[in-house]
Amino acid sequence: MVSQRFLIVCLASLVSACGSLPSAGPSVTEVETGVTDDDIANYLLVDIDARIVDVLSSRRDAGLYETFGDNAPAPDLRIGVGDTVSVTIWEVGPGGLFSPAPVAPVTEGGGATGASTSTIPPQIVSRDGDISIPFAGRVHVAGLTPEGAEAAIRGRLSGQAMEPQVLVSVVGNVSGTVSVMGEVTGGARVPLTLRGDRILDVIASAGGIKTPVYDTVIQLTRGGSTATVPMKVLLDNPRENIFARPGDVVTVSHDTRIFMALGASGQNAEVPFGSANLTLIQAIGKSGGVLDNRADPEGVFVMRYESPAVARELDPRSPLPEAGQPVPVVYRLDLEQAKAFFYGQRFAMVNGDIMYISTAPLEEWRKALSLFQTVVAPVTSTVGMSNAMSR
């Protein structure tokens, strides 16, 4: 009689224990019911299907091209403050300003003809943008191309020198440079060339990157704007490889992309992507797969924050995108459907994603039953021995 009552109490406790035993996380039902709390939406729950993967595949973060709108040709290089320039001046005929001792070849007619030349020592463009030219004084050259500076000097010498011809060369380019720093072989201020240099060109001029391509991020700062793109994007999309401009700052960073694997997967850990692109199916494989003795194949979840624009496309009826803040989204993949494997192979993982595989309901019963057996076995053994002794 005592043993029967004890068993009844234990069975009742077993039923209640299923909802109170320790668990790796919420069940499928708990995720579904947790979408709203007192009629307030907490997150979006989205089933991964063909439409969802199409929406996410069309999503593209703003890159260099979108941020700077730069489809213009290479910029003209202009002389700037701090540049070092060299000026050479020619005059026609002897006895000019720049030829105190002209060299004149003798012609058949016996007349002396020819041109005299004089090179002014290289000088740095001052803070006010000027350089000094003998007999012309201070000439403003900052902001001019070398051809424009030649014309300015020639105009100042007109009427003094004899048909002057001027050549201006930039021998030390400081203003027309791009600063390249970070995970490059040799960080430097890279001078731009007249041919025009794109972002990958200046990175190559700095010695190239030191980190794997798939873990490398490029940040471009221009004026008051900054944009960041993965290195792989620059390599795969030529449009993103825009022309560099004087004053740009290019920072190369090592950013190991990871996702968190939790729940009934082969390992619970931070898992690096290890490649340029990673799909959900690949992520499941990298984390040890779905444990068939514990996992609920209907409950493979990916959790991340999405922009309001993306959230509106995922579920136009949801009130969450109206808040204007990043929207928490829970994506669900049901691996009991064969087509879900194809959807999962098109679903791209994002840096910082949480992949959670829920525990099967029967696993909770197994835990409770194991606890029940642990508690009951000593009691039933004692009761059995007591009954045997009473006979």
Image (cartoon, grey):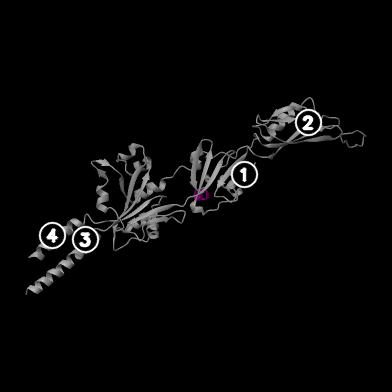
For label 3, the crowd category at 10 Å Cα-Cα, with few meaning under 14, some 14 to 19 and many 20 or more, is many
Residue beneath disc 1: 190
Amino acid at pointer 2: Pro
For label 1, the crowd category at 10 Å Cα-Cα, with few meaning under 14, some 14 to 19 and many 20 or more, is many
Kind of element beneath mark 1: strand
Amino acid at pointer 3: Ala
* Residue 101 point in image, percent of width and height: 87, 33
Name above or below for residue 385 compared with residue 222: below
Dot label at residue 368: 3
Residue beneath disc 4: 9
* Magenta-colored span: 231-236
Gap in Å between the C-alphas at discs 2 and 4?
Answer: 112 Å
Amino acid at pointer 1: Val
Residue pictured at 34% horizontal, 41% vertical: 312
Amino acid at pointer 4: Val
Residues tagged 2 and 1 counted as in contact (Cβ below 8 A): no
* Residue 16 point in image, percent of width and height: 18, 56
